[in-house]
Image: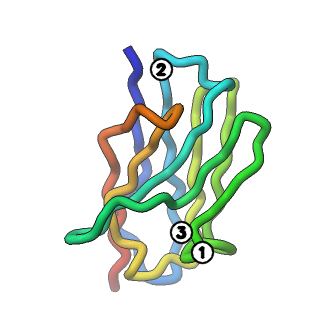
Amino acid sequence: QVQLVESGGGLVQPGGSLRLSCVASGIFFSTNVMAWYRQAPGKERELVAVIRTIGNTNYADSVKGRFTISRDNTKNTVYLQMNSLKPEDTAVYYCKAAGTYWGQGTQVTVSS
């Protein structure tokens, strides 16, 4: 059974930073594409960043230069480092594995 567990969300002031983590189990982590999505209230879920098996990455235009996705295959973990956070980054952030499996989400709130 595939399980994805996100952590690291919270309340942060504008301009601050957070690092999200997602630990995967039940899959061959190193051979799967991993991604972060987010969903703000009243909006559709959107792709934030994706990292492929060889480490190449893509980002939504709205987070380029501020967010960094990375993976540690020895820990079955994917990370999302978020810097220079803005109020519009407020959302529930979800981890997705293999284009199929979702985590439960972690809330990120950017507010003064």
State which tag comes first along the sequence, 1 or 3.
Answer: 3
CA gap, disc 1 to disc 2?
A: 30 Å
Seen in the image, is 55 located left or right of residue 49? right
Q: Residues within 10 Å of mark 1 (few under 14, many from 20)?
A: few
State which tag comes first along the sequence, 2 or 3.
Answer: 3
Three-letter amino acid code of the residue under disc 3: Ser
Seen in the image, is 34 located left or right of residue 51? left
Residue pictured at 67% horizontal, 47% vertical: 70
Quadrant occupied by the N terminus: top left
Residue 110, given in percent of the width and then of the height, sits at: 37, 75
Residue pictured at 50% horizontal, 76% vertical: 85
Residue 14, given in percent of the width and then of the height, sits at: 45, 83
CB within 8 Å, label 1 to label 3: no
Q: Residues within 10 Å of mark 3 (few under 14, many from 20)?
A: some
Seen in the picture, residue 32 relative to 45 is either above or below; the reply is above
Three-letter amino acid code of the residue under disc 1: Asp
Q: How crowded is mark 2: few (under 14 residues within 10 Å), some or many (20 or more)?
A: some
Q: Nearer the viewer, mark 2 or mark 3?
A: 2
Q: Name the residue under label 2.
A: 25
State which tag comes first along the sequence, 1 or 2.
Answer: 2
Seen in the picture, residue 11 relative to 30 is either above or below; the reply is below
Q: Which of marks 1 and 3 is in front?
A: 1
User: Looking at the rendered structure, which numbered label has been put on residue 61?
Assistant: 1
Q: Nearer the viewer, mark 1 or mark 2?
A: 1
